[in-house]
Each structure stands twice: as C-alpha cells, then as structure tokens.
Image: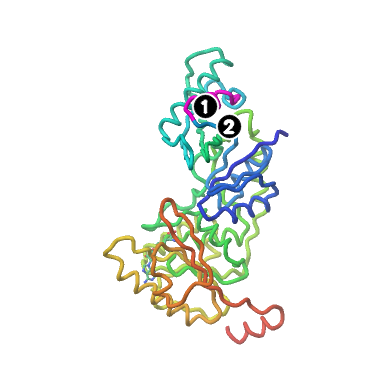
C-alpha cells in the first residue's frame, strides 16, 4: 500500500500527548511542530487516525511542500503538485485555511486565491478542459507557511474531530472534546482511579474519561470527508477500522467518575450527552455546589474547567469560586487537582502554587493547565488496607 505523510493539527500545547497517541496507534512520527504532529501511514492510517485519535483536531494528507518567498514561487510550487493524482475532474477544491508564521507571504486571502488559480492550471493540463464543474466530492486544503516553507495538506476529516457527535447541548463555555481528552491524558489518571469534575457543565471531561475507561474510540460514530472520495481510502478500510473500534470496547464495571454542577439544567444536559456517548452508566452526575465538594475515598483526581470570569462583572464571584475550590481541595486528603483556566489569579485564590503548569491555547485564548499533584496510592496489600479504612 502507498505510504502517505499525514499531518494532525492539535491545540497548541498538546503536541506531546498527540505524539504519544500516534505512536501508540502504531505509526512513525516524522515531525512535531507547534500545533501539529506529522507521521507516516498508509490509506488504512487515514481511517484509523480519524477514528481513534482523541486529541487531534483533524487529519490532513500531505500533498506537497516547497519554498516560496514570492507569489510567483507560491504559484509555481502549487502548480507543480500533481493535483490530478488526487482530485477527480468534478472535485470541489479550495484552500480552506492558510496559516503563516515568520514568512514573507502572510495574507491568507491572497495565498488562498493564488493557490486556487495554480491548482486550476495544473488540472487543466491533465484533464484538457478549462472550466471545472466542481459539483463532485469536496477537497478542502490547509496550508502552513513556516519560515517560507509551504506545506500543503488535504483535509480528510471535514467537520473537526472534536465533534464526536454526542454533545447535542452545551454549557456557555464548553471545552472542546479533544482538548478535554488531551488534558486527561496529561494526568496520570486511569480507569481504576476516581475522577471528579466539580464544574462539569455539559459533562465533557467526565464523558471523555468514561470513553477512555471503556476504550471507546472517539470517532467510531461519525463520518469523515475522505469517505466520499474515490480512489484514496477504499470503503472497506473505513468499515474495518470501525469494526476494530467496536471490538476494542470493554465496558468496565467499577468506575468512579463523577460530574457536578451548580446548575440543574447543566446536570440534565450532561446526562443526555453521556447517554448519546453510550457511557451514561459509567458516570454519576449530580447538582452540587463546589462548596459541598467531598469524597469519602483517597487518591482521587479533580480534573476540571472552572468558570474563567472573562467578563469584568464576573471577576469577584470567580475569585470566590476558586477560593472555595482551594478549601475543598485541601480537605480532600491525598487527592490531585488539575484545572484549565485563563483566570490569572487561580493559584492565589486556591491558596497554593501548582506543582506544574502548562500553557495551552484554547483557540486564541491563552490558558494554563495547573497541576497540583497528590501522592501515589500505595500498591497491593497496603492499598487494600488503606482503602478499607477510608470507605
Ligand atoms: C466553564 S463551564 C464548564 C464547561 C464544561 N467543561 C463543558 O465542557 O461544558 C463552568 C461551569 O461551572 C458551573 N459553576 C459555576 N459556579 C459553580 C459552583 N459554585 N459550583 C459548581 N458549579 C459551578 C457553571 O454552571 C458552568 O457550567
């Protein structure tokens, strides 16, 4: 089978998590850049990456790369890509997004229109026609310019991978599903440890955790753009990858995953979303103020996305929320706390400096993932004795 170079964009700050996921899926990494990880794979990898990767934003198939400092070089470089090898005569094709960093060419709209003209020129030479109907399958392209090096990728995903399909209703400021999954993977949490999200909103963090606990591939219930293409990823590979994903599901019987929110409506929405994801039996949702946060057992994880207080009017109440969170966390013996927020005074309000923090861009918003690490649970017999004492 032909080998492709595939590019998986992700949130800035999540590259290491995505890289590990790709290696675990069985592929070799070729490059890691800010906000994207590249790897090698065959047509099968296009289907599997789309279906299995939790922290990726989409999967692009690299179709070319070249150096361009002028629009003429951009035109010629684009024209030299063998477009007709990928695009059928009726293809609908366009540059959906152009991102430029430290490069002479930086205007997205100019880059988009020049590349489109160059693609048409290349296609004309092969197909021998001058007007393309563009009424067939869609082939959106994404282009990165980094220090004048142009990388061109064809989007195999379509609607972003964070859209797993289970979140019909959301909170006011929901976290993207792929970011939530990536954050969980940045912690040492695993399925036999306790996870509580005290500000669960529409339930994204508990739902992503439950899907991990059940080994459910995030993309197994949705469709992808490349499924409508002919000649690149045979239909059979999509079916096989979905079957592989279904076969790997293993519903655990003893998870302790909980989501709380002050807002009753959010709790209702979380339950509906969990049901749509097929994990409603693995999560306990409850209306609860963070002021009443407690848990009888030790060594649990709080993984959460509290209110940010972006609006000036919210600032005071936000400080109070983080203070209460800090107090409740202090009372939770041996727990770890992981939280993502753009609220600058989070550590002050919580009353403790984080053991680690990591800058993560949530879209254009700079956020930090604060990590307050509790002790590791004792292993074997000691653990059982200690858990008996605490239950
Ligand atoms: C940023 S949103 C969480 C979004 C969530 N991660 C999602 O993906 O939908 C913060 C949530 O905190 C809840 N909240 C605000 N004050 C609270 C409190 N005192 N106790 C518990 N939840 C609270 C809000 O109702 C809101 O749903």
Secondary structure under tag 2 reads: strand
- Residue 326, given in percent of the width and then of the height, sits at 43, 77
- Residue 254, given in percent of the width and then of the height, sits at 61, 70
Residue at (52, 47) in percent of width and height = 57
- Residue 104, given in percent of the width and then of the height, sits at 46, 36
Q: From this viewpoint, which residue is outermost toward the right?
A: 1
Q: Is residue 79 above or below residue 166?
A: above
Q: Which residue position holds label 1?
A: 73
Secondary structure under tag 1 reads: helix
Residue at (31, 67) in percent of width and height = 315
Q: Which residue position holds label 2?
A: 66
Q: Is residue 391 above or below residue 121?
A: below
The part of the chain drawn in magenta is 70-82
Q: Main secondary structure of the magenta part?
A: helix
**Is 33 contained in the magenta span?**
no
Dots 1, 2 in contact, CB < 8 A: yes
Q: Quadrant of the C terminus?
A: bottom right
Q: From this viewpoint, which residue is outermost toward the left?
A: 313
Q: Residue 88 got which mark?
A: none
Q: Is residue 192 visible?
A: yes
Q: CA distance from mark 1 to mark 2?
A: 9 Å
255 vs 173, left or right, is right
């Amino acid at each position: 089978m032909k080998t492709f170079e595939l590019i998986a964009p992700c949130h800035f700050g999540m590259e290491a998590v995505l890289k590990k996921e790709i290696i675990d899926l069985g592929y070799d990494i070729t490059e890691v850049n800010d906000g994207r990880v590249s790897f090698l794979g065959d047509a099968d990898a296009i289907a599997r990456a789309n279906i299995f990767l939790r922290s990726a934003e989409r999967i692009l198939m690299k179709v070319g790369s070249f150096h361009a400092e002028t629009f003429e070089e951009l035109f010629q470089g684009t024209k030299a890509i063998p477009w007709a090898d990928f695009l059928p005569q009726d293809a609908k094709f366009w540059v959906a997004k152009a991102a430029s960093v430290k490069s002479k060419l930086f205007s997205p709209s100019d880059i988009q229109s020049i590349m489109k003209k160059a693609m048409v020129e290349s296609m004309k030479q092969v197909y021998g026609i001058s007007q393309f109907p563009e009424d067939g399958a869609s082939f959106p392209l994404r282009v990165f310019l980094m220090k004048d090096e142009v990388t061109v990728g064809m989007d195999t995903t379509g609607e972003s991978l964070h859209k797993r399909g289970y979140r019909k209703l959301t909170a006011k400021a929901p976290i993207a599903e792929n970011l939530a999954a990536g954050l969980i993977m940045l912690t040492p949490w695993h399925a036999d440890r306790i996870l509580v999200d005290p500000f669960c909103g529409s339930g994204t963090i508990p739902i992503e955790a439950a899907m991990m606990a059940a080994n459910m591939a995030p993309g197994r219930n949705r469709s992808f753009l490349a499924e409508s293409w002919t000649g690149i990823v045979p239909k059979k590979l999509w079916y096989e990858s979905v079957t592989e994903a279904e076969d790997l599901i293993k519903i655990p019987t003893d998870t302790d995953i909980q989501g709380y929110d002050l807002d009753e409506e959010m709790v209702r929405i979380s339950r509906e979303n969990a049901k749509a994801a097929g994990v409603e039996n693995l999560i306990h949702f409850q209306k609860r103020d963070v002021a009443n946060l407690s848990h009888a057992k030790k060594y649990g994880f709080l993984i959460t996305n509290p209110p940010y207080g972006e609006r000036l009017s919210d600032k005071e109440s936000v400080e109070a929320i983080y203070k209460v969170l800090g107090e409740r966390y202090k009372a939770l013996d041996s727990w770890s706390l992981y939280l993502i927020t753009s609220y600058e005074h989070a550590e002050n309000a919580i009353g403790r400096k984080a053991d680690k923090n990591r800058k993560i861009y949530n879209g254009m918003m700079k956020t930090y993932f604060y990590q307050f690490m509790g002790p590791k649970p004792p292993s074997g017999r000691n653990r059982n004795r200690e858990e008996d004492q605490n239950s």
